[in-house]
Amino acid sequence: MAKFKSIGADVVISPFVEIRYPQLVSIGDHVAIDFGFVLSTAAKIGNYIHIGPHVSIIGGKGARLILDDFCSIAAGVRIICRGDEHLGAGIVGALVPTKYKDRQIGEQIEIPRFAALGTNSIVMPGVTIGEGAVLGANSLLKMDAEPWTIYAGSPAKPIRLRPKETILEFAKEIGE
């Protein structure tokens, strides 16, 4: 197993996972990471996290992902922590020398407590996601997501509020 910055108890990681910089990754307790997961950023993965199959999180060594406790990442999700702007300031590409490179946008994406990203959803660089927010399947999040709000569509739009009292009570009973 890769040498992580830290790793908690009850962690299951498929052998078919690519974590490019494991020394920049800390993993909490009760975490499952399914096959086909690719991570090319630094990351802090909290407690009670499930990352579904074929999830990719990109942005390079200088970017960062934070997955807070009880968040869920479904199959096929794409999270772009940092990427090229694609507006012509330079050449697009990960290996282009800095002098010639397009402007980079984003740096860190945080998926806060109780938030969930549905199957095949995409999170673009520079967005902020509120606690308990949900992004529906096949949705594209290009704007900030308000706490305890459900978003769907491409681009994602708020469709309804999510009640939080029961979820917070269950987390309290678990001891978090």
Image (tube, rainbow, N blue to C red):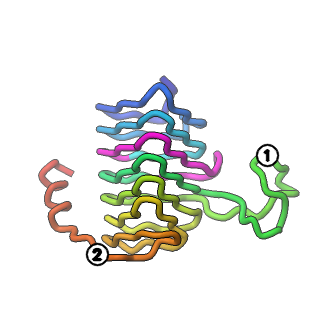
Q: Nearer the viewer, mark 1 or mark 2?
A: 2
In the rendered image, which residue does mark 2 sit on? 161
Residue at (26%, 70%) from the top-left corner?
Answer: 162
Residue at (48%, 51%) from the top-left corner?
Answer: 77
Q: Amino acid at mark 2?
A: Leu
| Residue span colored magenta | 46-66
Q: Amino acid at mark 1?
A: Leu
Q: Is residue 152 above or below residue 73?
A: below
Residue 173 position in % (x across, y down): 12, 52
Q: Is residue 62 magenta?
A: yes
* Residue 29 in the figure: left or right of residue 35: left
Q: Is residue 148 magenta?
A: no
Other-residue count near label 1 (Cα within 10 Å), few / some / many at <14 / 14–19 / ≥20: few
Residue at (19%, 61%) from the top-left corner?
Answer: 168
Q: Quadrant of residue 23?
A: top right
Q: Is residue 154 above or below residue 115?
A: below
Q: In this view of the protein, which residue sits in the foreground, 102 or 34?
A: 34
Q: Is residue 160 above or below residue 21?
A: below
* Residue 68 in the figure: left or right of residue 104: left
Q: Quadrant of residue 92?
A: bottom right
SS for callout 1: loop
Q: Quadrant of residue 135?
A: bottom left
* Residue 83 in the figure: left or right of residue 28: right
Q: In this view of the protein, which residue sits in the foreground, 101 or 8?
A: 101
Residue 48 position in % (x across, y down): 29, 45
Residue at (57%, 63%) from the top-left corner?
Answer: 124
Other-residue count near label 2 (Cα within 10 Å), few / some / many at <14 / 14–19 / ≥20: some
| The label number, if any, that marks residue 95 in the structure image | 1
Furthest-right residue in view? 100
Q: In this view of the protein, which residue sits in the foreground, 20 or 157?
A: 157
SS for callout 2: strand
Residue 142 position in % (x across, y down): 55, 70
